[in-house]
Image (cartoon, rainbow, N blue to C red):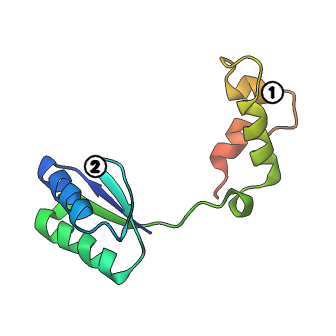
Amino acid sequence: MLLIVTYSEAARTGLRNLCRRHEEPVVRRFGRAALLDATAYAAFLAVRLRESHGGDVQIERTEPFNEFVALDDSVREAASAYADRDAKSTPYAAFAAGTEHPNPDRLKGEEL
């Protein structure tokens, strides 16, 4: 997919118009950003928008995040357990202390 992010009012207007006129390649719109299908037509629309607005338009190629491929089971299990914790105000570091859940410092240092 292509992620388009706009940084000016004129570029946001251009993105809004692009999404309204060309609904087929639009996967999702987020106001100042949009996800488009990974097609040559979507790339054409994105580059055309950047040609019109220069540095106020950023285009990134993205891929969907598959947590079952990208993460260890321990990370997914920790996220699930943390979401179901009793005290919602407990920070993750305190929640994970003394358990088998991954330490937040370890998580911050690991690449996906």
- Tag 2 secondary structure: loop
In front of the other: 6 or 96:
6
Question: Left or right: where does residue 93 sit relative to residue 52?
Answer: right
In the image, taking residue 52 as reference, residue 1 lies left or right, namely right
| Residue at 23%, 60% in the rendered image | 20
Front-lying residue, 102 or 74 = 74
Q: Amino acid at mark 1?
A: Ala
Relative to 69, 5 lies left or right: left
Q: Of the residues shown, which amino acid type is indicated by label 2?
A: Arg
Quadrant housing residue 88: top right
Ranked by sequence position, the earlier of labels 1 and 2 is 2
The answer to whether 108 appears left or right of 1 in the picture is right
- Residue at image x 81%, y 47%? 74
> Quick one: label 1, few (<14), some, or many (20+) residues within 10 Å?
few
Picture quadrant of residue 53: bottom left
Q: Residue at x 78, y 30 (%)?
A: 96
Residue at the spot of label 1: 97
If the image is split into quadrants, where does the C terminus sit?
Answer: bottom right
- Mark 1 and mark 2: span between their CA atoms? 39 Å
Q: Is residue 19 above or below residue 33?
A: below
Mark 1 in CB contact with mark 2 (< 8 angstroms): no
Residue at 81 percent of width and 52 percent of height = 73
- Secondary structure under tag 1 reads loop
Q: Which residue is mark 2?
A: 32
Residue 100 position (above or below residue 62): above
x, y percentage for residue 26?
Answer: 36, 64
Q: Position of residue 95 (x, y in %)?
A: 76, 25
